[in-house]
Image (tube, helix red, strand yellow):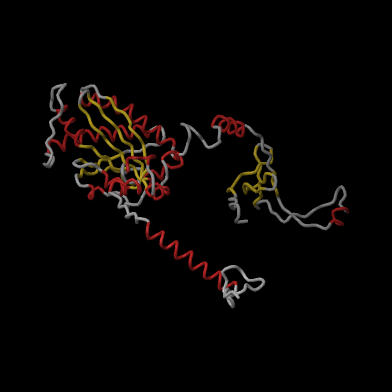
Amino acid sequence: MSDTPEQSPGQSPGQSPGQSDEDLAAAWGADMEAEAGDDAAAMPVQPARVLNQAEIDSLLGFDDGPSSGDNRSGIQKIISSGLVSYERLPMLEIVFDRLVRIMSTSLRNFTSDNVEVGIDNIVSLRFGDYLNSIPLPAMLAVFKAEEWDNYGLMVVDSAMIYSIVDVLLGGRRGTAAMRIEGRPYTTIERTLVERLIQVVLADLSASFDPLCPVSFRFERLEVNPRFATISRLSNAAVLARLRIDMEDRGGRLELMLPYATLEPVRERLLQQFMGEKFGRDSIWETHLAEELWNTDVELDVVLDEQVMRLADVMRLQVGSRIMLNSQPDSTVSLRCGATTLFEGRVGRRKNRVAVRIENPCLRAPPGMM
């Protein structure tokens, strides 16, 4: 006789008598979880990696500052996606190109030196971001557009300041301008820079002349960006960076124009080329106007109007009379088609019946009828 219990029919191997299939599955699941836990405990735990400041700036897109333009990445590009790009104002780029050409000539006459002016880039950014990125020390000139009743900002960096002072005071060619940092600008330096700003503002006005007449007037000169706030920090603005080279000297000059300042001429800045009339042809308009002046127009003089039944009209014969409700001094209407143009009085001039116009009839605008 054997002591091994007999396996009943339908019983799985390893299943004890009285144990159901659900209990057996639960036991197997518990054993597998215990083994997985042992394997996880045996594996070494990787320590959390801490990002440095450079990696954080690269992730947020602040590594290159506001001057990076289209190379922005990360969250900065998402934040700045709501800004209006300057490409939507194509005529503004032509204005700045014209400014570069005019400045090259005017600065040569102003400094009596060989001056080359170039444009680095034109970007759109928030006004507050630009104020925070201005390299100090610098001079910030606030100017006003008289016809647009708004303000703009011009920034002259320290290299340009010392270069223009050195040139205007007779510095030798071939020697770099002396820079003394850490001190406030003197009255002579501020005066010479103001003369440079006046020249640039006059050239900027001339650059806008083909588009619209505007005069830019110099307001004040600041050295602290907080005192040069001309717009809300979150407002969009257009920044043009100009590079001025005077042989081995030179510097940078930046023009900041908020979009609120350009709003009065926004429709003209949206043009693709000079003289665009949004689908209209000025030559055809002039020809049409000239032909309209030579057009013959028939005018009808209405003495009186009466409402009659059709039966009475059908009974009219030669010799029938219609009594008019008008007198010799009554006013009559002059009509072109169904439109009443004037009111006048009937008279006689050189054996001809004439009508003297008394007053025009003002037509109601569409929608008021």
Q: Is residue 200 left or right of residue 22?
A: left
Q: Return the x and y of residue 3 as percentages of the image width and height.
A: 57, 75
Quarter in which the C terminus is drawn: bottom right
Q: Position of residue 347 (x, y in %)?
A: 65, 44
Q: Quadrant of the N terminus?
A: bottom right
> Residue 18, relative to residue 244: is it above or below?
below
Q: Nearer the viewer, residue 261 or 225?
A: 225
Quadrant of the rendered image containing residue 135? top left
Residue nearest the observer in this picture, 104 or 346: 104
The quarter of the picture where residue 117 lies is top left
At which x and y percent is residue 304?
72, 52
Residue 303 or 270: which is nearer the viewer?
270
Return the residue found at the far front: 1
Question: Is 330 situated left or right of 308 in this image?
Answer: left
Q: Is residue 54 above or below residue 325?
A: above
Residue at 83% over, 58% down? 309
